[in-house]
Image (tube, rainbow, N blue to C red):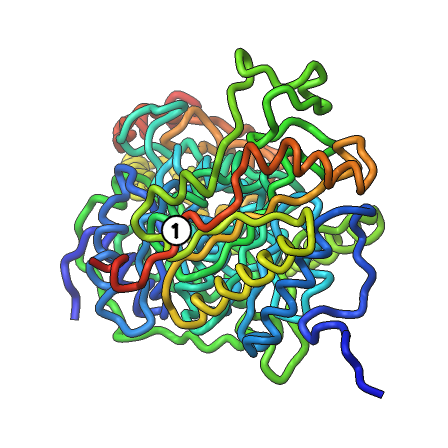
Amino acid sequence: MQKVFERPKSLNDRPFHYCPGCGHGIVHRMIAEAIDELGLQDRTVFISPVGCSVFAYWYFETDNVQAAHGRAPAVGTGIKRANPDSIVISYQGDGDLASSGTAEIIHAAARGENFTVIFINNAIYGMTGGQMAPTTLVGQATSTSPYGRDPKFAGYPIHVSEMLATLKAPRYIERTSLNNVANLTRTKRAIKKALDMQNKGEGFTFVEVLAPCPTNWGLDPNESIDWMESNLIPEYPLGVYRDVKTAEVKS
Amino acid sequence: MKVLMKGNEALSEAAIRAGATLYFGYPITPQNEVGEYMSRRLPTIPGGAYIQAETEVASINMVYGAVSTGRRAMTSSSSPGISLMMEGISYLAGAELPAVVVSIMRGGPGLGNINPEQADYFQATKGGGHGSYRMIVLAPASVQEMTDLTVLAFDLADKYRNPVMVIADGNLGQMMEPVELKDSYPNNYDHSAWALTGAKGRKGHTITSIYLDADEMEDYIHKLYRKYGEIERVETRHEEFLTQDADVVIVAYGIVSRVVRSAVELLRAEGIKAGMVRPITLWPYPKAVLRKLAETATFFLACEMSMGQMVEDVQLSVEGRRPVYFYGRSGGNVPTPAEVVAAVRQRM
């Protein structure tokens, strides 16, 4: 009998603590698969953020470090500069990266730090209970925007991939989504491409993944996919925002 | 061979010779010579790295990442910048990571000024960051000690897996004195049991400070406090000057101790039996020494460049056995020996 599907080596045998329909488990698995396929397990240092994925280190059979809220790109900078041979993955949600950690992500990108950031964007704070995020859509009701996000008081969503793409140093920036199989495949491909580039020393790589949060959106998993397609993806267009050859970055 | 060096540059060179070839920092006066010196030296050293971080918040978190790999790393700043590092210092203590932070105190609160003060004593020794933790705090009083205590800071950080602060003021950072440096200092702590170097031929290592369960968190805090207790027993350091027969014990640290030394000599010349205790570790504090002296001294005078912060530790040490007075200057003013003599005479 042939085994056609198994747990990646870089993922351990522990059930995910995430809610039904959450995107984190899917992306964790993709990262582990990419690490395995590229043979990077024994050089990887995975950085867990503050948020629902604070315990991401429970799942990765690699070296792990937990960072303060928003600070993962600074922690990653320290690890990578101390040990350039390591493969550093900074895994962050939208509250962590696009709010508390805006300075850290912009400057790590501007310096062209040779590591990979996986940015999970579900337009809401998960762990603290569904508060408004910088990525929350206009009109989206959350526990701290109960009447819907009103641009008069709360401004507009931040588009991180577009912002980072204005910088010269980043090597690769892509936004993908978890809404259907084709986009899952694209997400996995983007993660693997980013890690491969890091392994080759090509520079800063960034994959933004639009992900469902049924619990805090107040929807069931199927409704969440519909909401992503009719609301989230139109606000955050998918695609490659930057993919430059190393030589061009250096010029 | 002695060379003439600025305090900030001397401590930087000492750190490099102790193997700390990773530096992350953000400009702020009066400690800019540290970052400037590191930016010249570190790129020329194999494996060395200097980064001018976007903020002090980022600096301390870069240190957190760098020391997670088992290598020596440091940052430095001055009062407002050290305030921004407090979150990171709490994380370093919570994750039991060895790191060295140099604090060159300036005037405050708020933006204050760039003159020397000692008003960040509470911040350094009483927490500053959140949660139940302790940081070892070393207070040099000369440019030579800026180097010696920086080297000691790395050793203590490695020995106890704990953040260590070297705290000085703008005077010590800026002044030049002859200093003797060794070619290198030992840097041979084995961190292979926990360092994040990639899980090659071993299980993955994890560095974290989160414990959701109340009992688990309490057990972890108790473990930290057993370590802090050991540090208090073993690592408390101080210097005494003419205290054996002293009626008046003046307590001062850092640059102020040099003023007080002169004041003690002037008082002795007048026939007043004065002496000085100079805490070298501000945490752990040399409580036992002061408590013992309380048996023979008439009174204590704490002298600081602040409105009175360390004086509270003198009071706690003396336990009400003798009066504890305070004399301090602020805003960048340094007390003179004559002022200290007058402050003592006033209480005689």
Secondary structure of residue under mark 1: strand
Expressed as whole percent of the image width and height from the top left, the position of residue A134 reads: 56, 30
Work out which quarter of the rendered image holds the N terminus of chain B and state it. bottom left
**Percent position of residue B75, x then y:** 38, 51
The image shows residue B208 at horizontal and vertical percentages of 65, 56
Q: Which residue lies at the image location 65% right of the left edge and 39% below the top edge?
A: A122
Position in image of residue B34 (x %, y %): 27, 51
Mark yes or no: residue B314 visible.
no
Q: Quick check: B100 left or right of A10?
A: left
Counting labels gives: 1
Amino acid type, mark 1: Arg
Q: Is residue B236 above or below residue B313?
A: below
In this rendered view, identify the residue nearer to me: A247 or B15: A247
Q: In the drawing, does residue A19 fall left or right of residue B328?
A: right
- For the C terminus of chain B, the image quarter is top left
Q: Which residue is mark 1?
A: A242
Give the residue drawn at x 24%, y 65%.
Answer: B43
Tell me which residue sits at (31%, 49%) in the image: B52
Name the foreground residue: A152 vs A92.
A152
Q: Residue furthest left?
A: B4
Q: Residue at x 29, y 26 (%)?
A: B113
Classify residue B114 by image quadrant.
top left
Is there any visible trace of residue A153 in the rendered image?
Answer: yes
Relative depth, front residue between B190 and A7: A7
Q: Nearer the viewer, residue B227 or B297?
A: B227
Location of residue B293 with respect to B62 vertically, above or below:
above
Q: Residue furthest top?
A: A152
Left or right of B337? Residue A75 is: right
Q: Given the image, what chain letter belongs to the residue carrying mark 1?
A: A
